[in-house]
Image (tube, rainbow, N blue to C red):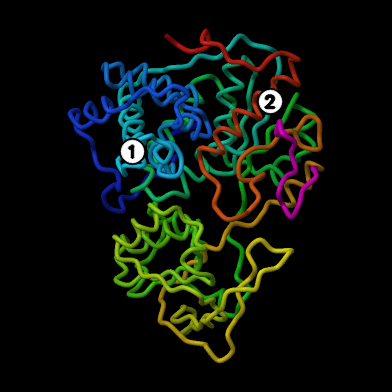
């Protein structure tokens, strides 16, 4: 990766993560009971040996601690910042019943921050196998798969449409949650293992899927999802109406975002919506409001994200959906909403659609409107590979193999939208699984990665 082409991050205020003193770290580490069959490890999708990495922090062995984390989770530095730990490791901690779980996420961040600053390289490539795998996409799943494959000795070529690697970790998460330099550092650790990289290349446009299948011994599709789709209402073409991911990326990179105005409306209630809300607030908008067609209990954002947005001064309006956007010349100036009522239970829908209440329309002022209602699916790309899919979701078996014997898939492109949002840590684990499955297919050998491939 050409770091000169990497985006330059713009500051949007202080990090949400407080710095821990060495005394705080040692006190917290020494609370760990080193549980047998530790529930925190079982709760982690990548199965980090939590007790082991905490014990090593307590003895001052930060390199060993970081190795335990990164061995299990190639995105360990990012996940230390963005994981919903209260629902995973910390939620499973034996101290959780007393409302004082060990601060596992903070300790993981402490160890990985040391690794970032130290310049230590933990991993080495394995002995060359003569096999070459193409990875489409360089987000958490793609980078995770790449690292595992290189440690197993396979040659890897990454294709990514962006100028820098990292996917949403680099471009789509606000810097006060996940600094860009952390995401780029994780990508660089993978590239140090020796990877052929083609950035600025869109598979499906610049290179045909059939070419990848013909040229490579295996392909791992880790392309994520697309942009936020239009709402399908009048006025969406007005200036000042944004796709949430584009808004966050351009604000994060300082690329042409004007002042958002005194009033900002964000449509949606997931983690991306929270990022857009808090980003707009930190860009100086006095009033930032989230509008959601369902109720508070239905929002898919993590609870800690919701709490953070409230502390930032964001407002929330439930049971209302936009029906048109109003402009003054080319600029958006207001949004008309209609109030909604919860939908009736249906045997075909896990979450029935809410119904509009006739005569309940109202208009709110907004100089910036941000759509954050989920991402579109890359159905054309998936179809280009000839893969079985369901509405843009790649069909895979338990090994993450697709309907094509040479193609595997991981990350958001296989995530079925449900009652919550996909997690970075899940994508990292899926990348590992896809890599292990591709390895078994290519070598007809066990996929275990031995400690000999880890730098001592």
Query: Image quarter for residue 145?
Result: top right
Q: Is residue 354 above or below residue 442?
A: below
The prevailing secondary structure element of the residues shown in magenta is loop
Which of these two is toward me, 191 or 449?
449
Q: CA distance from mark 1 to mark 2?
A: 42 Å
Disc sitting over residue 133 in the figure:
2
In the structure shown, which secondary structural element does the residue marked by tag 2 occupy?
A: strand
Query: Image quarter for residue 395?
Result: top right
Side of 106 where 250 appears, left or right: right
Which of these two is toward me, 311 or 240?
311
Disc sitting over residue 72 in the figure:
none
Q: Residue at x 56, y 81 (%)?
A: 324
Mark earlier in primary sequence (1, 2): 1
Indicate the position of residue 168 as horizontal and vertical percent values: 50, 46
Dot 2 surroundings within 10 Å: few (below 14), some, or many (20 or more)?
many
Q: Are marks 1 and 2 in contact (CB under 8 Å)?
A: no
The question of residue 388 being in magenta is answered with yes
Q: Is residue 406 above or below residue 122?
A: below
Indicate the position of residue 429 as horizontal and vertical percent values: 57, 32
Mark 1, residue position: 101
Looking at the rendered image, the quarter that the C terminus falls into is top left
Indicate the position of residue 71 as horizontal and vertical percent values: 48, 21
The segment highlighted magenta reads 387-400
Residue furthest toward the front? 97
């Amino acid at each position: 990766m050409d770091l000169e082409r990497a985006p330059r991050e713009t500051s949007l205020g202080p990090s949400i993560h407080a710095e821990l003193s060495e005394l705080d770290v040692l006190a917290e580490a020494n609370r760990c009971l080193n549980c047998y069959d530790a529930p925190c490890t079982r709760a982690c999708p990548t199965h980090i040996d939590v007790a082991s990495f905490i014990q090593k922090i307590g003895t001052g062995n930060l390199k060993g601690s970081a190795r335990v984390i990164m061995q299990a989770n190639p995105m360990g530095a990012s996940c230390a910042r963005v994981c919903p730990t209260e629902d995973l490791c910390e939620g499973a901690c034996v101290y959780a019943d007393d409302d004082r779980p060990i601060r596992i996420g903070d300790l993981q961040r402490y160890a990985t921050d040391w690794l970032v600053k130290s310049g230590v390289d933990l991993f080495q490539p394995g002995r060359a196998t003569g096999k070459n795998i193409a990875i489409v996409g360089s987000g958490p799943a793609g980078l995770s798969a790449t690292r595992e494959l290189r440690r197993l000795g396979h040659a890897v070529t990454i294709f990514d449409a962006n100028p820098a690697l990292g996917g949403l970790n680099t471009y789509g998460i606000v810097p006060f949650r996940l600094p860009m330099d952390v995401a780029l550092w994780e990508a660089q650790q993978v590239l140090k293992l020796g990877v052929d990289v083609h950035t600025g290349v869109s598979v499906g446009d610049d290179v045909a899927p059939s070419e990848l299948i013909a040229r490579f011994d295996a392909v791992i599709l880790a392309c994520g999802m697309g942009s936020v789709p239009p709402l399908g209402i009048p006025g969406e073409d007005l200036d000042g109406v944004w796709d949430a991911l584009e808004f966050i990326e351009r604000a994060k990179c300082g690329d042409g975002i004007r002042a958002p105005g005194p009033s900002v409306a964000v449509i949606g209630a997931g983690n991306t919506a929270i990022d857009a809300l808090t980003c707009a607030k930190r860009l100086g908008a006095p009033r930032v409001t989230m509008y959601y067609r369902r109720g508070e209990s239905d929002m898919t954002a993590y609870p800690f994200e919701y709490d953070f947005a409230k502390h930032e001064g964001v407002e929330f309006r439930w049971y209302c959906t936009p029906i048109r956007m109003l402009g003054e010349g080319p600029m958006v100036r207001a949004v008309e909403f209609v109030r909604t009522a919860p939908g009736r239970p249906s045997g075909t829908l896990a979450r029935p659609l809410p119904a509009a209440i006739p005569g309940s329309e109202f208009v709110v002022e907004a100089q910036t409107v941000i759509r954050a209602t989920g991402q579109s699916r890359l159905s054309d790309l998936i179809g280009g590979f000839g893969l079985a899919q369901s509405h843009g979701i790649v069909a895979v078996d338990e090994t993450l193999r697709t309907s094509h014997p040479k193609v595997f898939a991981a990350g958001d492109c296989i995530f079925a939208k449900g009652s919550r949002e996909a997690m970075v840590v899940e994508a990292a684990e899926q990348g590992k699984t896809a890599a292990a499955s591709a390895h078994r297919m290519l070598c007809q050998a066990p996929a275990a990665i031995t400690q000999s491939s880890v730098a001592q």
